[in-house]
Image (cartoon, rainbow, N blue to C red):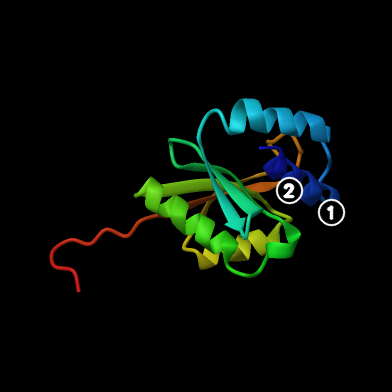
Amino acid sequence: MDVCADIFNRWVDATAWMPRVHAPADVQRYYREVLFANGEVIVADCQGEIAGFLALAENGFVSALYLDERYRGVGIGTALLREAKERAKTELRLWTFEHNTGAQRFYRREGFFPLRRTNGDNEEGLPDILYSWRAVSFSGREA
């Protein structure tokens, strides 16, 4: 849990537009007491090292998807998201910040589409976008 919280904390510290709203120790406590306690967390292990993680709530909501900087761009995020799609079966939803254009491109490549936007109705006060993915259902005979 602490390693996952550290991945998130390093991302916050390295992202110029992202304000730090919680101290690193508070993030670790939140991950232990809330994130890991109230849903599934899928962890990417690369030779015994945690490369990234995805937190998935029962309702198909992805509340976190973060990768250690050294493991970005090599398919780990895609693998985590595909595992979440398999577990959710029909639909996933998630928020991403409007400033995070790389994440938006990634989610769109993975079949997500924007549902709505806010002007910063979150604790960071940043504009964000709600994305959704729905499994394709075939009727009749499948090819």
Q: Residue at x 46, y 50 (%)?
A: 84
Mark 1 surroundings within 10 Å by alpha-carbon count, few (fewer than 14), some (14 through 19), many (20 or more): few
In the image, 99: left or right of 132? right
Type of amino acid at the residue the image marks with label 2? Ile
Residue nearest the viewer, comparing 90 with 40: 40
> Which residue appears farthest toward the left when viewing the image?
140
Q: Is residue 89 above or below residue 63?
A: below
Which quarter of the picture shows residue 20?
top right
Q: Residue at x 76, y 38 (%)?
A: 124
> Which residue appears farthest toward the top when viewing the image?
33
* Disc marking residue 7: 2
Q: Which residue is mark 1?
A: 14
Q: In the structure shown, which secondary structural element does the residue marked by tag 1 occupy?
A: helix
- Residue 15 at what x, y percent from top left? 82, 53
- Residue 64 at what x, y percent from top left? 61, 44
Disc 2 or disc 1, which is closer to the eye? 2
